[in-house]
Amino acid sequence: MIERATFREKMRSSIDDQPTTPVRRVYDAAVSSVSRQGGGDRPPRIEAFSSFRTILNRARSKRMPEIPRGVEEVEIQGPWRPQKVVCDFEMALITALQSELPQVSIQGCYFHFTQSLWRRVQELGLVRAYRENLRLRKCIRKLMALGYLPRPLVRLNFNSLRRSQRTIRLIDRNPSLLDFFGYVQNTYIGGFFPVPLWNVFDREMDTRTNNHVESYHKTLNDTIGVRHPSLWTFIRCLKDRQTVVEQTIDGAERGELAPARRRKWRVLEERLR
């Protein structure tokens, strides 16, 4: 069996070199390293991770500052005055924003708006009709496109679409479509989420959805590598991402070309303009 003290020192060194890597991953990497050094023909005889867990966690804790025990121990430097928040349609979140950040403009994400409508299509059993009936598909898509109209025209066009003879015939053949109109009416036209929350007619192109934020969250999650990181691991990863962002900004200022966007997104943006 490999000498315990030697292996322990190897892992402590890895803890110092990789302060944000989970201790279990440090242990597994050390075992793999020892195995490769021995030729890899036979697994190394090393004590189980449980024998080293306490030692590794103690070594890690010595490198990390103490976690704040309350708000009074946290000091955020500089002013933080957000002007706008783009979010999905969760009443608890919106209520919290209105309470804690009364000065911000709250805007619903248009992608989540259309996703909400599509989920209702699925719940009402309209998916097959949507795929097979061109007129019904156009009707539902028109409802999804209401957010692109000027606000004063949203309710007018909703009522016009609902009362049209073509829609009435569609409802006769697909009664669930009436329930779908009722859902849109009660939830987004005159219900929980008022038109200004999800209408994007007057918004800038970059703030119609929060897709870029969710993409950043995915990148950040991939960087962290664990579901529940410690506070200091999270902060260190934020600093690492900030370094990447600053390098990207510097490159743009030097005239470096931005990554090419997919053609379908360029075409869609031009159509929306």
Image: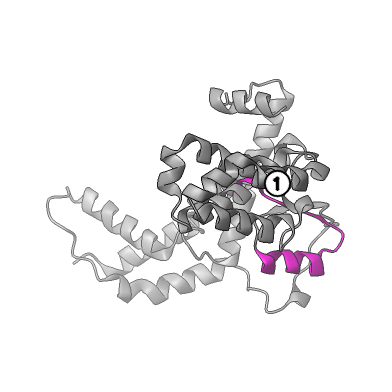
User: On the rendered image, what quadrant is the C terminus found in?
Assistant: top right
Q: Which residues are magenta?
A: 90-111
**Looking at numbered disc 1 in the image, what kind of residue is underneath it?**
Phe
- Left or right placement of residue 250 versus residue 117 in this view: right
x, y percent for residue 60: 50, 68
Q: Secondary structure at mark 1?
A: helix
Q: Which residue is mark 1?
A: 158
Q: Is residue 18 magenta?
A: no
User: On the rendered image, what quadrant is the N terminus found in?
Assistant: bottom left
Question: In the depicted view, which residue is nearer to us: 14 or 121?
Answer: 121
Find residue 187 and report its image quarter.
Answer: bottom right
User: Residue 262, can we see it?
Assistant: no
Residue at image location 31% in from the left, 75% down from the top = 50
Residue at image location 58% in from the left, 49% down from the top = 214
Q: Is residue 106 magenta?
A: yes
Residue at image location 52% in from the left, 36% down from the top = 135
User: Residue 186, can we see it?
Assistant: yes
Q: Is residue 23 above or below residue 39?
A: below
Residue at image location 41% in from the left, 65% down from the top = 23
Find residue 5 and report its image quarter.
Answer: bottom left
